[in-house]
């Protein structure tokens, strides 16, 4: 019998990392999860606590703690070590801290012989995705970030509350930075296959309360609304990460909005930004280039400019 054990390491087991591990366990996505944290006792306690779920779920997932040096045989390493902005509503505020956290970590993981796929979740996630790609030396297909996956889910949820439909019947993407310059590509948002703009035109009175600009603003601010009230956002992003991990391990070829390194797509290169991509066992198999409107092209270029300017601050 040929054994193919699916192994995932999670670096940083605070709210986001532990929520990701919890989602992986409950959805029976992988066979082994190794937790790594700068506080070994916290990693041990999280692994022990999570191992006590096994009697109540459909499959056994082996939980244990480890180190960067043990990442050599991992299929995926999920990077959740980071910090929240102290003040303001800008994830770019923690760029310098994120750089300091990752510059030693990535080298040690690569020295272990790791040849798998990195998934970045730490903010500012587009910048972290780019720096991990540069630090690791891996092909760009093997380094991606959670990007606008969570923002896309928030958009679908908000639209579903107004129409109302199941969020899974809403299709579309939030593009650009996972941050202040993100935007929904309204030209590609559909409900049951019907463009949302057509729905509004055909039913102006019935859906007069649905304002696209308001939905876009609420989507962008959703994370901050949660953060200000409870100090973190972790359940949504934890499940987004689990979704990406499952798509990779199962070779699903699902199209998901992630932070991907561009090399000419959308006329951009040398940065990572939120775009729809086909996710497979290779990581980012292909970036999906949407036919954007002129206004959307301008919004995307503006968002990329913000990321590109921030990249200049990183000593890579």
Image (tube, rainbow, N blue to C red):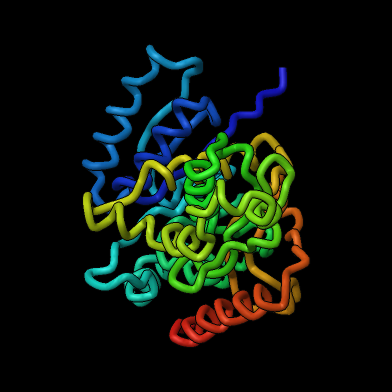
Residue toward you, 212 or 175: 212
Report whether 288 appears left or right of 153: right
* Residue 60, x across and y down, in percent: 47, 19
Residue toward you, 28 or 180: 180
**Residue 100 figure quarter:** bottom left
Residue toward you, 127 or 75: 127
Number of dots carrying numbers: 0
Query: What residue is drawn where x is 53% and y is 42%?
Result: 160
Report whether 263 appears left or right of 128: right
Q: Is residue 68 above or below residue 135?
A: above
Q: Is residue 82 above or below residue 306?
A: above
**Residue 185 figure quarter:** bottom right
Residue extending furthest toward the front: 205
The answer to whether residue 201 is seen in the rendering is yes
* Residue 238, x across and y down, in percent: 43, 43
Locate the N terminus and report the quarter of the image it occupies: top right
* Residue 67, x across and y down, in percent: 38, 48
Report whether 300 appears left or right of 121: right
The answer to whether residue 100 is seen in the rendering is no
Query: What residue is drawn where x is 39% and y is 14%?
Result: 56
Q: Is residue 15 above or below residue 316?
A: above
Query: What residue is drawn where x is 61% and y is 55%?
Result: 257
Residue toward you, 72 or 81: 81
Query: What residue is drawn where x is 49% and y is 73%?
Result: 181
* Residue 168, x across and y down, in percent: 60, 37
């Amino acid at each position: 019998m040929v054994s193919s054990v699916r192994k995932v390491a999670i670096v940083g087991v605070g709210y986001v990392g532990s929520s990701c591990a919890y989602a992986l366990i409950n959805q029976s996505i992988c066979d082994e999860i190794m937790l790594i944290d700068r506080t070994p006792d916290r990693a041990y306690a999280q692994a022990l606590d999570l191992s006590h779920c096994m009697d109540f779920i459909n499959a056994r997932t082996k939980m244990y703690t480890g180190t960067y040096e043990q990442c050599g045989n991992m299929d995926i390493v999920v990077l959740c070590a980071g910090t929240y902005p102290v003040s303001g509503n800008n994830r770019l505020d923690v760029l310098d801290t994120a750089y300091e956290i990752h510059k030693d970590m990535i080298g040690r993981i690569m020295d272990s012989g790791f040849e798998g796929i990195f998934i970045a979740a730490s903010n500012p996630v587009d910048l972290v995705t780019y720096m991990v790609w540069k630090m690791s030396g891996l092909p760009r297909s093997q380094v991606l970030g959670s990007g606008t996956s969570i923002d896309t889910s928030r958009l679908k949820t908000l639209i579903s509350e107004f129409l109302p439909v199941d969020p899974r019947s809403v299709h579309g993407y939030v593009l650009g930075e996972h941050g202040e310059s993100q935007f929904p590509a309204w030209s590609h948002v559909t409900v049951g296959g019907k463009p949302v703009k057509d729905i509004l035109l055909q039913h102006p009175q019935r859906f007069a309360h649905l304002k696209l600009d308001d939905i876009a603003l609420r989507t962008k601010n959703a994370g901050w609304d949660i953060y200000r009230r409870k100090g973190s956002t972790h359940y949504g992003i934890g499940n987004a990460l689990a979704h990406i991990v499952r798509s990779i391990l199962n070779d699903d070829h699902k199209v998901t909005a992630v932070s991907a390194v561009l090399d000419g797509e959308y006329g951009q290169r040398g940065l990572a930004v939120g775009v729809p991509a086909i996710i497979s066992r290779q990581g980012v198999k292909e970036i999906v280039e949407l036919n954007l409107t002129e206004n959307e092209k301008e919004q995307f270029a503006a968002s990329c400019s913000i990321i590109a300017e921030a990249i200049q601050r990183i000593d890579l």
